[in-house]
Amino acid sequence: MPPARSLTSPVRSSRPALARLLRQATALIVGIALLAGCDGSATRPSPEQTRRTLERLMPRHVKERAAWAQDIQAAFAALDLDPSHSNLCAVIAVTDQESNFSPQPKVPGLGRIARKEIEARAERKHVPLFLVRAALQLESPDGRTWDQRIAAVETEKELSDLFEELIAKVPLGRRLLADANPVRTGGPMQVSIAFAEAHADDRAYPFAHAGSIRHEVFTRRGGMYFGIAHLLDYPASYEKPIHRFADFNAGRYASRNAAFQNAVSVATGIPLDLDGDLIRHRRQKGSDGIGDTERAVRTLAPKLGMDAAQIRRALSNAHRHDFEDSALYTRVFEIADKRKGKPLPRAMLPRIRLESPKITRRLTTAWFANRVDKRYRDCIARVPR
């Protein structure tokens, strides 16, 4: 059995070569322990102990604490994650931030948002709005018009189910929505449905279910399982939990990649948006397909001893943990650290403004990460001493 993942890894050295040696030594120690028949699982708390701990750590406002604890503990067991206080508090903090522990959180003005999305899709597909509005005035199976039902939805699950029904029964539904339900997140951790479906393709969903993975995301059990997987089920070298919280919002390794962009900017003197997006994957009209970060890195090609193709290949692995062991990553930080006169941070909060029809004010990934981190620290303070 592989070693369990924790919220943070041991402190990462500012010297990449030393960091690699430390990881190799750790792997060797783990391997010896496995050969000896001791993988550390004997020291883990029992499922009952984990559930009791969860009930103590949850905020006081949480209802059905035993049920929440059961589903969270089951997810940790299925994913083989360490139920440490740090990991449990991370899950509690994100869930409280995203939904206040509601399996199906209500979204203010969701009906208005949905109607706007339908009309925007109609415009993109060159469907006259009067036809769309006429279609929505048709009577639905429950006696109300589709427009009335859209106006009444309060949760993303209700809207997702309604869209599926709309696609199947309204003539314009399939053309407008193209078999693609526009509800993209759901559940108590507001996890991406695309992530959940991809995760289930890669690793079989461990719980019996009658519906689709999309439907499971909107349950407490499925929403917590996929949310916990997104938050914790990947290796990271972060020293502080806040960077994993930022990744939850902005994408895995966004915090590490934002720090890499900062190093590129220091090494080249070229200002960059620290958004954690190192490579442009889609060629835009009138563009050469090269993003600002890649273009800046290419100016370092002589110092890196790499050509454009090698740089492109290395940056293409920015979604992987071992990107930080690459020659590109190592050399860029060596150049930047020397120019700065001190080691630069290996993780930074990405500077991303959050964009969503549900967001009505100016919010950023840093705002989200800091809010979650405050809840995390509150949870850690509830750990019995």
Image: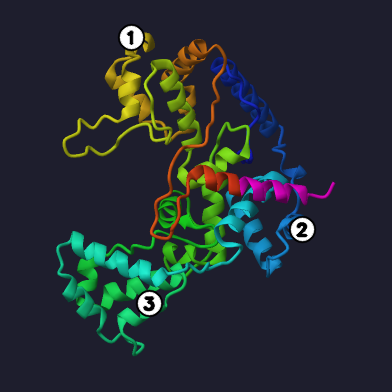
Q: Main secondary structure of the magenta part?
A: helix
State the residue in front, 116 or 323.
Answer: 116
Region rendered in magenta: 372-385
Of all residues, the one furthest to the front in this rendering is 361
Amino acid type shown at disc 3: Ala
- CA gap, disc 1 and disc 3: 60 Å
If you read the primary sequence from the N terminus, does the residue marked by circle 2 or circle 3 appear first? Answer: 2
Identify the residue at horizontal 59%, vertical 20% (top origin): 19
Of tags 2 and 3, which is closer to the observer?
Answer: 3
Give the mark toward the camera: 1 or 3.
3
How far apart are the alpha carbons under marks 2 and 1? 57 Å
Which amino acid type is marked by label 2?
Arg
- Badge 2 is on which residue? 56
SS label for mark 3: helix
Marking on residue 302? 1
Residue 316 position in % (x across, y down): 35, 31
Whether residue 301 is visible here, answered yes or no, is yes
Q: Amino acid at mark 1?
A: Pro
Residue 284 place in picture, x, y as percent: 21, 39
Picture residue at 48% right of the left edge, 25% below the top: 324
**Mark 1 and 3 residues: CB-CB less than 8 Å, in contact?**
no
Mark 1 and mark 3 lie on one chain; the one further toward the N terminus is 3
Label 2 CA crowd tier, 10 Å (few <14, some 14–19, many 20+) = some
Q: Give the label on residue 151, or none.
A: 3
